[in-house]
Image (tube, grey):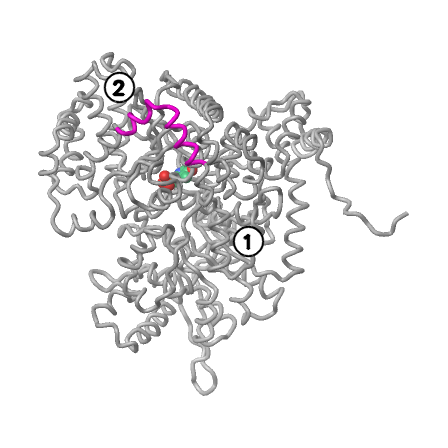
């Protein structure tokens, strides 16, 4: 007998063992027998069988981090747009095929139960999806990391289209339970709001420290989800906080017969983690939002400090052992919160606390849109977080002194960098707070980082040169190629082997196959199959029949004026007009897909959705078009829908007003799946162009500095519109009610806006866009050439893997070895 104990928990992964464990999970954890099991029961049992195998790795990863005393990364984000996890986890564990076989022996189709898994939509769009890709890449690259966020009971709303209008319905993703998460009741921290600040003095009357006495208190309870890296390399934790009352029932009120009032605390705590604010790149300035931001930041910091103290004893080493990353300014309140904990709880002086705080935090800026830069009224701040307001004043005094001492800042410039905006109601500027409280501030594409230095943070950049750096966004190839496009993945493996699956840069080897006619044909067949799948989904969901040999032209992303879905729709109207006027011409059949959610309070964005649907209805049923043009608005765009649509795209629409899209990541997903891009020189499009080559992308429109020049030198859209016959006709048709006969005035205001100011340069870019679309048509007619370029796109965008982005963060910001 051996005395050395083997790990008794090591679980087998052959199909027979998996099948046995699925049955056992079904029986002993769900209390079900196969004869009565619903598809949801099979889904839960399958996930649990794999989850048990992940747990071994999870515990191993955690132990290693402790034993080797590795520096930890904490990624704070108010949003994680995760999507479904089953395929991701099975595939990263290398269990996809064995699970398929195991379930088949039980008479269950894995693809069928996969579609039942709810789409975890705890985010709005790109920012939240980036956080999800980063979590997966950090586990893949082997970085000890925790993600911190909020466990919203209702994530992003579900979008339905009623009579062409967006209708928002609550998303109940937790309805059938969540087999991925572990509730950690023992991991609960108290969070305070309001109240007052007391000054404690020593016997001689000198100020010793401040103590915040909050008036309200609640608990943040942790829910953990394991995040598996590629090939199960490492398993990290996504820890989401849920609000719980300290006293679930107020007994005094209850006994006095006030049964509703007795639940007051419970309801208040519940509200904190109830809903995600559905505003993307626009202001969500309500009190509940600030409460959510503080709630999850404060809980995360208590957790981080407790872990640090338990392994290092002392907080002086914090910046050496801990990197805290702020995904946008939403968690920037963590900066004064850490200062408060270091000074008021751990007794440090201001200077030391400030040095440790700056050494620990780094901040990513995601937008230059003025309406999206967070500010909070000083009054609100003082009421909710009185001690933090004092600390912000102290930080402000300190750093403005530093700025004045350089002699390089006049009064006006000092006012601009101040943490407090003084004109017309005093407000706290969260962007400036995040900037001064961090040792690194990064943009998300080369262009965006340059613009940051020239615009929003120009003065702060002068004061702290070197602090701003660029980290161009990325996407995980596991989800956005291997899982979403198994056909293309298989074809690439056949051609160049498996090296690209561990190093996306190795996709480069595919370049040589662009000139191989037989490879091009196989490539085209994969695309065709993906398009047939999307056509089937469109028929099923919308009853619209599509020809998969038509060009699939896709614009899917949040609906926002700067993203210019309106430009795309107007061009479709102009094309419709051309097809009807010149039926003799050789038109390229095209299906124009649009999809995306509008913030419920964003009037113009919702109107643009209605316009897309109105235009679709008229064009799709006009026999004069002979099916040459179809317009389809796909409802409820989310991660799962993206996974079906992107592999089916021939043309990727990335047409934002130059200078306004910080990076984009949708653009990367499309290129990786072999779509050609039509786009402006904005965000990461600029770098995609550099990677794929000028001949393999369609660039149009004004560049960022030209947009700026137009705006500053007086841009007259009316003159531009008068000069363009096609544009004038299309606008007249929309404005006069051709697409809205039931309400002819519906789009008058929207179109008048283009004539009057056209802030987003739709008119200025229209002719260039339309002309470029005709070049796209010309290339489409040359199918070998089209596919040659598409293959070059796949081969040359490996650099946009989020593994590359994360390695850059690790080396250049966090100081973590990779
Ligand atoms: C990638 C992604 C986005 C971001 O798309 P952009 O085109 O970069 O704005 C938004 N939503 C979902 C569901 C995504 O997958």
Q: Is residue 205 magenta?
A: no
Quarter where residue 308 is shown: bottom right
- Where 402 falls versus 449 (above or below)? below
Decide which of 770, 462 is in the foreground and name it.
770
Query: Does 21 sit left or right of 465 as displayed?
Result: right
Residue 491 x %, y %? 53, 29
Disc 1: CA contacts within 10 A as few (<14), some (14-19) or many (>=20)? many
Indicate which label's residue lies in the foreground, 1 or 2: 2
Mark 1 and mark 2 lie on one chain; the one further toward the N terminus is 1
Report if residue 173 is visible in the image. Answer: no
In the shown orientation, is residue 203 left or right of residue 100?
Answer: left
Residue visible at 65% across and 20% down?
Answer: 107
Instruction: Please give the range of residues in magenta.
Output: 775-794
| Ligand 1 falls in quadrant | top left
Task: Give the percent coordinates (x, y) of residue 269.
Answer: 46, 50
- Image quadrant in which the C terminus is located: bottom right
- 3D distance between C-alphas at marks 1 and 2: 53 Å
Could you tell me which residue is drawn at 12 percent across and 38 percent down? 720
Question: Residue 808's x, y, as percent?
Answer: 47, 54
Residue under circle 1?
145
Determine whether the residue tagged by mark 1 lies in a helix, strand or loop: strand
Residue 587's label in the rendered image is 2
Ligand 1 contact, mark 2 (Cβ < 8 Å): no
**What residue occupies the far bottom of the structure in this picture?**
204
- From the viewer's side, name the closer residue of 200 and 693: 693
Dot 2 surroundings within 10 Å: few (below 14), some, or many (20 or more)?
some
User: Circle 2 sits in a helix, a strand or a loop, which is it?
Assistant: loop
Would residue 776 be counted in the magenta stretch? yes
Magenta: main secondary structure: helix
Q: Residue at x 39, y 40 (%)?
A: 692
**Residue nearest the viewer, comparing 689 with 92:** 689
**Snapshot quadrant of residue 457:** bottom left
């Amino acid at each position: 007998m051996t005395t050395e104990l083997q790990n008794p928990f090591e679980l087998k992964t052959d199909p027979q063992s998996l099948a046995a464990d699925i049955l056992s999970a079904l029986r002993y954890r769900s209390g079900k027998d196969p004869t009565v099991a619903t598809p949801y029961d099979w889904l839960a049992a399958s996930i649990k069988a794999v989850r048990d195998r992940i747990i071994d790795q999870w515990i191993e990863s955690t132990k290693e981090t402790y034993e080797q005393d590795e520096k930890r990364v904490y990624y704070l984000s108010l949003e994680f747009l995760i999507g479904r996890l089953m395929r991701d986890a099975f595939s990263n564990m290398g269990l996809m095929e064995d699970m398929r076989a195991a379930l088949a022996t039980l008479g269950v189709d894995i693809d069928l139960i996969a579609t039942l898994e709810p789409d975890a939509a705890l985010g709005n769009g790109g920012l939240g999806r980036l956080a999800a890709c980063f979590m997966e890449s950090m586990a893949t690259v082997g970085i000890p990391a925790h993600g911190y966020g909020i466990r919203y009971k209702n994530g992003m709303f579900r979008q339905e289209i009623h009579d062409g209008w967006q209708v928002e319905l609550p998303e109940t993703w937790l309805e059938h339970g969540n087999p991925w998460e572990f509730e950690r009741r023992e991991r609960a921290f108290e969070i305070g709001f309001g109240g007052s600040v007391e000054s404690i003095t020593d016997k001689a009357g000198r100020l010793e420290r401040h103590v915040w006495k909050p008036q309200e208190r609640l608990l943040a309870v942790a829910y953990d989800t394991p995040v598996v890296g590629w090939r199960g390399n490492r398993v990290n934790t996504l820890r989401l906080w849920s609000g719980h009352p300290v006293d679930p029932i107020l007994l005094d009120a209850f006994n006095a017969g006030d049964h509703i009032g007795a639940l007051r605390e419970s309801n208040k705590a519940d509200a904190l983690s109830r809903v995600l604010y559905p505003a993307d790149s626009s202001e969500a300035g309500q009190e509940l939002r600030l409460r959510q931001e503080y709630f999850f930041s404060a809980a995360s910091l208590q957790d981080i400090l407790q872990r640090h103290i338990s392994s290092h004893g002392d907080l002086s080493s914090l910046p050496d052992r801990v990197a805290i990353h702020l995904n946008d300014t939403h968690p920037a309140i963590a900066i004064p919160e850490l200062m408060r904990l270091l000074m008021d709880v751990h007794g440090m002086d201001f200077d030391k606390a400030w040095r440790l705080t700056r050494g620990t935090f780094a901040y990513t800026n995601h937008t230059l849109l003025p309406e999206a830069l967070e500010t909070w009224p000083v009054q609100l701040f003082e009421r909710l977080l009185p001690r933090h307001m004092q600390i912000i004043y102290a930080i402000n005094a300190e750093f403005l002194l530093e700025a004045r001492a350089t002699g390089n800042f006049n009064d006006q410039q000092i006012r601009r960098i101040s943490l407090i905006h003084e004109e017309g109601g005093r407000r706290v500027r969260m962007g400036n707070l995040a900037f001064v409280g961090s040792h690194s501030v990064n943009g998300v594409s080369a262009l965006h980082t340059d613009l940051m230095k020239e615009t929003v943070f120009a003065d702060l950049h002068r004061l702290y040169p070197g602090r701003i750096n660029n980290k161009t966004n990325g996407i995980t190839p596991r989800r956005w190629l291997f899982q979403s496009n198994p056909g293309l993945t298989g074809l690439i493996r056949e051609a160049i082997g498996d090296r690209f699956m561990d190093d996306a840069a190795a996709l480069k080897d595919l370049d040589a196959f662009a000139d191989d006619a037989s490879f091009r044909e196989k490539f085209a067949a994969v695309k065709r199959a993906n398009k047939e799948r999307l056509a089937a989904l469109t028929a099923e969901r919308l009853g619209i029949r599509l020809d998969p040999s038509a060009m699939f032209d896709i614009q899917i992303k949040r609906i926002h004026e700067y993203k210019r879905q309106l430009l795309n729709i107007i061009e479709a109207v102009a094309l419709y007009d051309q097809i009807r006027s010149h039926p003799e011409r050789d038109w390229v059949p095209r299906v124009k897909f649009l999809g995306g959610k509008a913030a419920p309070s964003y009037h113009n964005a919702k109107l643009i959705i209605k316009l897309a649907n109105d235009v679709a209805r008229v064009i799709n049923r006009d026999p004069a078009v002979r099916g040459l043009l179809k317009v389809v608005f796909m409802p409820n765009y989310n991660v799962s829908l993206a996974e079906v649509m992107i592999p089916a795209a021939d043309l990727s629409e990335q047409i934002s007003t130059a200078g306004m899209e910080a990076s984009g990541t949708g653009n990367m997903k499309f290129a990786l799946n072999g779509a050609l891009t039509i786009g402006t020189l904005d965000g990461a499009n600029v770098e995609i162009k550099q990677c794929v080559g000028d001949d393999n992308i369609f660039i149009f429109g004004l560049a960022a500095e030209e947009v700026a020049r137009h705006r500053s030198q007086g841009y007259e859209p009316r003159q531009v519109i008068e000069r363009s016959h096609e544009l004038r006709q299309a606008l007249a048709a929309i404005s006069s009610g051709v697409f809205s006969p039931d309400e002819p005035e519906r789009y008058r205001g929207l179109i008048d806006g283009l004539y009057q100011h056209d802030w987003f340069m739709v008119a200025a870019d229209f002719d260039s866009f339309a002309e470029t679309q005709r070049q796209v048509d010309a290339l489409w007619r040359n199918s070998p050439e089209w596919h040659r370029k598409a293959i070059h796109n796949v081969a040359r965008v490996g650099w946009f893997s989020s593994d590359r982005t994360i390695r850059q963060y690790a080396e250049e910001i966090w100081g973590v070895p990779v």
